[in-house]
Amino acid sequence: MPIVTDSQRSATRTQVRLVITQENRHLSSIALSVTLLIAVTFTLLTLFSLLARIVTQAIPAFSERGTSFLTGTIGSEPDKVGIWPGLFGSFAIGIGVLLIAVPLGIGAAIYLEEYAEQNRLNRFVVVNIRNLAGVPAVIYGVLGLIIFVGWLKPVTNGGTVVAAALTLAILVLPVVIITSMEAIRAVPMGLRDAGYGVGASRWEVTRDHVVPYAMPGILTGTVLALARALGEAAPLIMIGAITGLLPETSFSGKFTAIPMLIYSWSGRPDSSGGNIGWSNAAAGAGLVLLVLVLVFNMIGIFLRNHFEAKRVGT
């Protein structure tokens, strides 16, 4: 048997390391890496340029008005308007979406993945749920106008924030179901088998092992769904959200939301006098909407990290 010297072992280890780390990549791999880097750089530059544009346009609204821009009501002069009615509507819609879409979506995902038999009917249901996730938002607006504003008017009182929350909850429900199903499907089968092996029932395994393990992925999908719901304007237009004067806010009366204010104010021409124009007011409302979405995202990220830490035992 030939004797292998230390230098030969070192050379072999170096060659294996090069193969594993792909340090000796081919020209095609280098070209792909450069292309992906350019794509990421272009995307980040576009994102930061848009954010910089919004911030610079919103600075006059906050510097001149201060907190009154947040607490004031809608008006006809850009230097006196406030976004409180829209802020109230968007926050109420976000809470309604969380209370309606998240429990229903997670429950449906648990049933489809853990309890339903994999037959033609259930596969047909899953395919249709995936298709519903790509339906345009205006179609859900028509659905909300017919059902929640029309048929269920005694319950929702017509075009109110309750009808808007129900409509947007239905809008994001397929997204919550799909992301929750994927997170539950990623749970290792050995975790379920271990629970069954010690005599746990299916519900106990699902409740104590599957759902906590899949919760980080479920929360990620929930945050994405909520961000989409808060930014939609087409369903609100169909339901009847107003863009004019709104002296008071309530759950049973007329309502508006921040996307509606942005839509309305962006189309108005700026006057020559005054330091604040409609474009500044629209940018200020957009910045507040971004902060609102960021707050919900931070809550979701905190909960996701909490469940992730419990899952890995740290």
Image (tube, grey):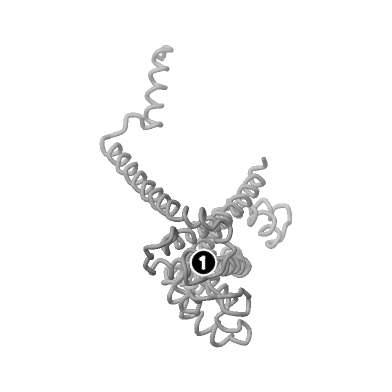
Residue 63 is situated, as x and y percent measured from the top left of the image, at 51, 53
| On-image quarter of the C terminus | top right
Q: Is residue 66 left or right of residue 238?
A: right
Q: Kindly tell me whether residue 204 is visible in this rendering.
A: yes
Which of 4/184 is in front? 184
Residue 144 is situated, as x and y percent measured from the top left of the image, at 51, 79
Q: Is residue 50 left or right of residue 202?
A: left
Identified by mark 1, the residue type is Val
Residue drawn at x 48%, y 67% as measured from the top left: 259
Q: Vertically, is 225 above or below 313? A: below
Residue 190 is situated, as x and y percent measured from the top left of the image, at 61, 50
Which of 258/303 is in front? 258
Q: Vertically, is 138 above or below 113? A: below
Question: Which residue is at the far front?
Answer: 273
Which of 291/296 is in front? 291
**Residue ID for mark 1:** 81
Question: Which residue is at the far right?
Answer: 199
Label 1 neighbour load within 10 Å: few <14, some 14-19, many 20+: many
Residue 211 is situated, as x and y percent measured from the top left of the image, at 64, 57
| On-image quarter of the N terminus | top left
Which of 260/299 is in front? 260
Secondary element under disc 1, as helix, strand or loop, is: loop
Q: Kindly tell me whether residue 116 is visible in this rendering.
A: no
